[in-house]
Image: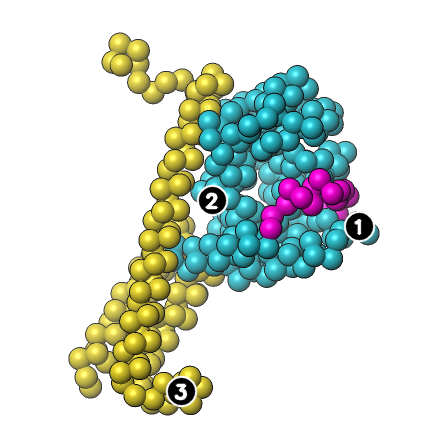
Chain colours: A yellow, B cyan
Amino acid sequence: MTPYQIAAPLLSLLALMYAWNLVLRQKKTIWEALLWTLFWGGIAFIALKPDVLSYLSVATGIKDQVNAIFVTSIGILFFFVFYVIIRIEELHQRFARIIREMALREAGMREDAVPEDKR
Amino acid sequence: MRVIAVIPAYNEETRIGSVVRAARTYAAEVIVVDDGSTDATGHKATEAGARVLRHMDNCGPGAATMTGIEAARLLQADVITTLDADEQHDAHDMPALLTPIERGEADVVFADRFALRNAIPLIRRFFNAIGNVVTLLATGRWVHDSQCGFKAFGPRAVKEIQLRMNGFEFCTEIVRESVQHRWRITQVPVKVLYSAYTLAKGQSFATGMKTAFKILLRSFLR
């Protein structure tokens, strides 16, 4: 067994535990956790049974290791770009929450959290 | 049951008045969230008898809907109905949406524009079908008309709902919330009126694709 064959399934196991823990804490739906299980299960399976990639090699034409490194790098970059998109989205959500709070206060529906003497 | 209607609106000065007046027939109060309009939407809504909340900037229909829901909660709403401001929905369908909640059979009621023989352009049917498939992929639940803004939320849903998405993807988020909180759902056929105006105001193909992408991405990376 190579170090990768030990590390990848362990990492997958951690990711799966994290995902199902979020389900228990009602932060992720079972469906989303199943998608994660499929993805990380695939990573672990490929690590343990690298021969399955030969089917992928026929389908994609990726035959040598240099191409595989390129494809993996592009995959990682995509992941980071998606991650940044999600973070920007979260900033927009914060912005919307502030605007919501201001709208509610302006309409006299929410009392100011900060007392007048502390302003 | 105290029913409050929530109408998110953006530049709808020509339509909002009649929508508010029709909704007032069935709701104890009507809340219009003026989502940073640059026209007289807020003024027209106030004139028609709505309580108006104003976003100082355009945040999107999801954010505006959540503002309305938050306001309705503060006004002790038992049931909330949401409808579009462009006269696409017929407020006279509200009793049909409220019936399953009043009978205690559902926590959230989705309107279904496709169950009746409504004159819906083919391109709209196609976009909605894509929206339904994306919603199914992201949430695991099939809803016949997942992208319709006409909905009713019962007491349990009113208490638990928390929308985070600002844009049009909030419709899919509502389906996700129904799965996560295990709400009982019902779908009720409603009339819909598509005019040149409503078609011009609807989502473009590019917006639809962006929305679909965001939904799928978020459902995976959440």
Q: Are marks 2 and 3 on the same chain?
A: no
Work out how far the residue at label 2 is from the one at label 1, CA to CA, in angstroms: 30 Å
Quarter of the image holding residue B5? Answer: top right
Q: Residue B171 placed where, x, y %?
A: 56, 47
Where, quadrant-wise, is the C terminus of chain A in this rendering? top left
Q: Give the range drawn in magenta.
A: B188-204
What label sits on residue B7 in the rendered view? none
Q: Residue B55 placed where, x, y %?
A: 49, 28
The chain carrying label 3 is: A
What label sits on residue B165 in the rendered view? 2
Q: Do labels 2 and 1 share a chain?
A: yes
Q: Do the residues labelled 2 and 3 touch (CB within 8 Å)?
A: no
Give the residue pinned by disc 1: B119
Work out how far the residue at label 2 is from the one at label 3, CA to CA, in angstroms: 39 Å
Q: In this view, does B54 lie to the left or right of A57?
A: right
Looking at the rendered structure, the secondary structure element under dot 1 is loop
Up the image or down, A36 lies above or below B69; here it is below
Q: Is residue B44 left or right of residue B117?
A: left
Looking at the rendered structure, the secondary structure element under dot 2 is loop
Give the residue pinned by disc 3: A61
The chain carrying label 1 is: B
